[in-house]
Image (spheres, rainbow, N blue to C red):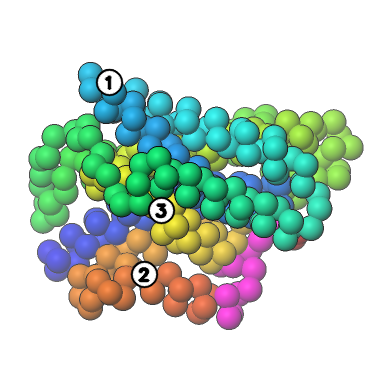
Amino acid sequence: MDLFLQQVANGLVIGSTYAVVAIGFALAFTVLRVINFAHPDIFMVGMFTGLVAATQYPVLGLGLVMLAGMLGAGAVGFVLERTVIAPLRGRDVLMTLIGTLGVAIMLQNGMALIAGPDPVAFPSLLPRRFIDIGPVALTLRQIANFVICLLLLALVSFYVRGTSYGRATRAIAERPDVAAAFGVNVGRICQFTILLASLMAGAAAVSVGMLYGSASAFVGLLYGLKAFICMLVAGNRYFEGVMVVALAIGIIEALVTGYLSSSLRDAVAFFVLIGVLYFRPNGLFGSYSS
């Protein structure tokens, strides 16, 4: 029983990170009808921006390093939206997919050229200390990562449900033509959506770098793939559904690792995807029509 609870706790930690990145995918696809394959590498840029800030200015705490990561990721997301996504928005979804995929490859290889293809050490922003919560033992970094991701998810949920921009976002997701007819500035909402997703990715990236103690130019590949699967399994109608699926996949991965084999962990998401989409092609919670 103790092993089960420990693995569930570990799964919640990793699943919360999947959820933050998956929400970025869902926001872009819901509002802009764009599959932003550069989003995982914006996550990677945020991780390295935080790494540089923490290395050059060791006195900075976790909060300021995370702010640096958010600013770096947000800047790349803003430029991406202005130069690639905005000119292609409204055209065939395949065009934006190819465009953002090209940007992702550029970001990956550009960072590999600068920092090298191998993982580099990420500074320790929190002490190595275990905290016992009943039969579960978690490190301070795991708890911090989980709390940070939950705060980000709560923030985006409040934005979508409780702000005027969020209501405009939902209106565009449902019927962009009607929203525009009622005076919603569709271009501005789309621009802010990409910026918000990028800022969230930057914060989560710093948290993940701190958690595992390393950063890699190709870290976005794994997180991007898992997060994209989470969005497909959940559907993009309810952001809370994406969060639930991401946490569930994280827990299942951890249980498979603990009871079967770690080599099967990365296959879990694909088995879940195939099983769910066979019976519910629009995802567990439904999707907006494109």
Comes first in the chain, label 2 or label 3? 3
What x and y, as percent, mark residue 35? 64, 55
Residue sitting at 27 percent across and 20 percent down? 57
Residue 146 located left or right of residue 178: left
**Mark 3 to mark 1: distance in Å?**
25 Å
Mark 3 vs mark 1: which is more N-terminal?
Answer: 1
Say above or below: 146 vs 289. above
Q: Amino acid at mark 2?
A: Asp
x, y (%) of residue 200?
A: 47, 38
Question: Closer to the observer: label 2 or label 3?
Answer: 3
Quarter occupied by residue 8: bottom left
The amino acid beneath tag 3 is Phe
| Residue at 20 percent of width and 70 percent of height | 258
| 280 part of magenta stretch | yes
Quadrant location of residue 179?
top right
* The N terminus lies in quadrant: bottom left
| Residue identifier under label 2 | 266
Instruction: Give whichever of 91, 274 is nearer the camera.
Output: 91
Q: Are marks 2 and 3 in contact (CB under 8 Å)?
A: no
The answer to which of 120 and 254 lies nearer the viewer is 120
Q: Tag 3, which secondary structure?
A: loop
Q: Badge 3 is on which residue?
A: 218
Percent position of residue 213, x then y: 23, 44
Q: Is residue 117 left or right of residue 236?
A: left
